[in-house]
Image (spheres, helix red, strand yellow):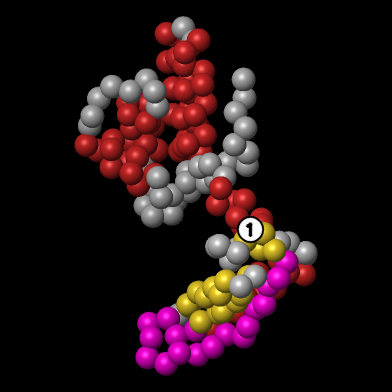
Amino acid sequence: MLTYDVVIWSIRQRAGRPKPRELRWRVGSQPHSKSYALKPQADGRRSQLMAALREGQQFDEETGLPVKELAALAMPTWYEHAKAYALMKWPGAAAKHRASIAESLAVVTPVLVTAKNGRPDARVLRTALYQLGLPRGGGSRWGARIALRRRGTAQRRTASSRLGG
């Protein structure tokens, strides 16, 4: 449930912990907290939450997040979007067109994947997507599966989940 009833408290120090700075806030009747190793990290997050309050954003009681952050979490990743697009186009497409869809998505995907968490080489990623990740499917090569698993943790979110027709 969304609400404007938000209280953000100051950062408290907790001695003897790996992340000794704790930011606490309450949304509706639900308390929320997040711990940080450094005070500037906690200050930065507190500033983000305060800015969301000043902008008049509602907060989600369950997660404690502002509406804009909640929307970003619900946004599909590029891989999810590409796979849904290919599956939508697949049934009515001719064989050559299917190959073109898979190839196009496999070529553009490395550009839309961030370098976080050790992105695999672009050629390995394209091969993995072309063979396993997109509906064209086929092989079960171990290296390709690892590339897709890594890619799942290091990808951009799409701006819209709407698929073109």
The residue shown at (58%, 41%) is 158
Name the spot of residue 66 as percent of width and height, x first.
65, 62
- Look at the image and say whether residue 116 sits in the magenta stretch: no
Of 51 and 139, the residue lying toward us: 51
Q: Is residue 25 left or right of residue 38?
A: right
52 vs 113: above or below: below
Q: Quadrant of residue 27?
A: bottom right
Q: Which residue is mark 1?
A: 1
40 vs 14: above or below: above
Name the spot of residue 146 as percent of width and height, x first.
28, 42
**Quadrant of the drawing holding the N terminus:** bottom right
Of 107 and 58, the residue lying toward us: 58
Q: Quadrant of residue 12?
A: bottom right
Is residue 30 in view from this perspective? yes
What's the amino acid at mark 1?
Met
> Looking at the image, which residue sits at the far bottom?
15
Name the spot of residue 79 as percent of width and height, x first.
46, 37
Assign a secondary structure to mark 1. loop
The residue shown at (37%, 31%) is 133
The residue shown at (62%, 20%) is 165
* Count of numbered circles in the view: 1
Is residue 107 in view from this perspective? no
43 vs 79: above or below: below
The magenta segment is 4-21
100 vs 38: above or below: above
Q: Is residue 120 left or right of residue 3?
A: left
- Look at the image and say whether residue 8 sits in the magenta stretch: yes
Main secondary structure found in the magenta portion: loop
Q: Is residue 7 left or right of residue 106?
A: right
Of 116 and 18, the residue lying toward us: 18
Decide: few, some or many residues near mark 1? Use Cα within 10 Å; few <14, some 14-19, many ≥20: few
